[in-house]
Image (spheres, helix red, strand yellow):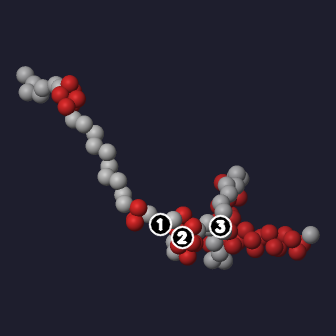
Amino acid sequence: MESSRKPLDFGGLEDFDVTPPPARPAAFSAPKPVKKAIDKVASFPSREASEDSQMNIKASADILERFRQMAKKERYKHGEFLQVLMDAYGKKR
């Protein structure tokens, strides 16, 4: 079976020139102090730094499953339930 595909001629690509992007007029660029002031006022809430953080806990599967079940039973998120446990531990000491 014969292939009808032909190899590409990369030598023919030398005829193309790269054109530089058009220059933007100065009227479209805002001065830096003005741009910073606008950015402070018009910031997106989704881009602000979150106060939440994350950590991994290495423990046996039984302990982690027990923690998940206890949090689920009391309808706590894991972070909230961890806070409840830490507060109880602090009062105990």
Residue 76 x/y as whole percent: 65, 75
Between the C-alphas of marks 2 and 1, the distance is 7 Å
Residue ID for mark 1: 30
2 and 1 marks in contact (CB < 8 Å): yes
* Amino acid beneath label 2: Val
Between the C-alphas of marks 2 and 3, the distance is 31 Å
Query: Which residue is located at x 57 percent, y 67 percent?
Result: 33
* Quadrant of the snapshot with the C terminus: bottom right
* Amino acid beneath label 3: Asp
- Residue 68 lies, with reference to residue 11, above or below; the image says below
Query: Which residue is located at x 8 percent, y 27 percent?
Result: 4
Mark 2, mark 3: which one is toward the viewer?
A: 2
Residue ID for mark 3: 52
The mark nearer the N terminus, 2 or 3, is 2
The numbered disc on residue 86 is none
In the image, taking residue 81 as reference, residue 42 lies left or right, namely left
- Label 2 residue SS: helix
Question: Is 33 in front, or is 71?
Answer: 33
Query: Which residue is located at x 67 percent, y 55 percent?
Result: 56
In the image, taking residue 65 as reference, residue 10 lies left or right, namely left
The mark nearer the N terminus, 3 or 1, is 1
Residue ID for mark 2: 34
* Amino acid beneath label 1: Ala
Which quadrant of the structure image shows residue 40?
A: bottom right
Residue 11 x/y as whole percent: 20, 25
* Quadrant of the snapshot with the N terminus: top left
Dot 1: few (<14), some (14–19), or many (≥20) neighbours within 10 Å? few
- Camera sees residue 49: yes
Mark 3, mark 1: which one is toward the viewer?
A: 1
